Image: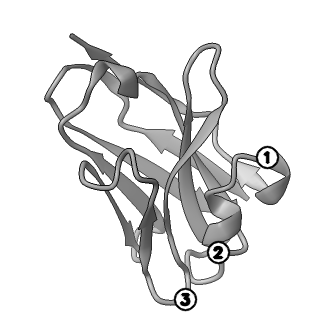
Amino acid sequence: VQLVESGGGLVQAGGSLRLSCAASGFTLDDYAIGWFRQAPGKGREGLSCISSSDGRAFYTGSVKDRFTISGDKTKNTVYLQLNSLKPEDTAVYYCVRGIDCIAAMSTRATDYDKWGPGTQVTVSS
């Protein structure tokens, strides 16, 4: 079972990135996939989740109008589109597997059983 993030990079404020979370060893039909980020010296921030049962998307308030989560079950991959990026979005972004979106958007590592190595997003002003 593995999750691998990609798509991070350096972008100017106002720019966009699309992050990918490739899942292997399980299917998106069985688990919710969430994203969280962690900036240096700060705690985890749960950002978004896509439900396995009905594909519903959930967002935290700070990113709701700027980030979009989607899933491609044929590729077993979840995407997080980041738009209108701000310097404060700079962080390492991780995808996680949870039994549901309450778990997958938690800030407690014990609430999800798998996460990837992360991908760095840096937004310059």
How busy is the neighbourhood of tag 3: few (under 14 within 10 Å), some, or many (20 plus)? Answer: few
Which residue position is annotated with label 2? 31
Mark in front: 2 vs 1: 1
| Left or right: 61, with 10 as reference point | right
Q: Secondary structure at mark 1?
A: helix
* Spatial separation of the CA atoms under disc 2 and disc 1: 16 Å
Q: Nearer the viewer, residue 17 or 73?
A: 17
Residue in the picture at 33% in, 23% down: 9
Q: Nearer the viewer, residue 55 or 24?
A: 55
Dot placed on the residue nearer the N-terminal end, 3 or 1: 3
Residue 13, above or below 63: above
How busy is the neighbourhood of tag 1: few (under 14 within 10 Å), some, or many (20 plus)? Answer: some
How busy is the neighbourhood of tag 2: few (under 14 within 10 Å), some, or many (20 plus)? Answer: some
Q: Secondary structure at mark 3?
A: loop
Which residue position is annotated with label 3? 53
Identify the amino acid type marked 2. Tyr
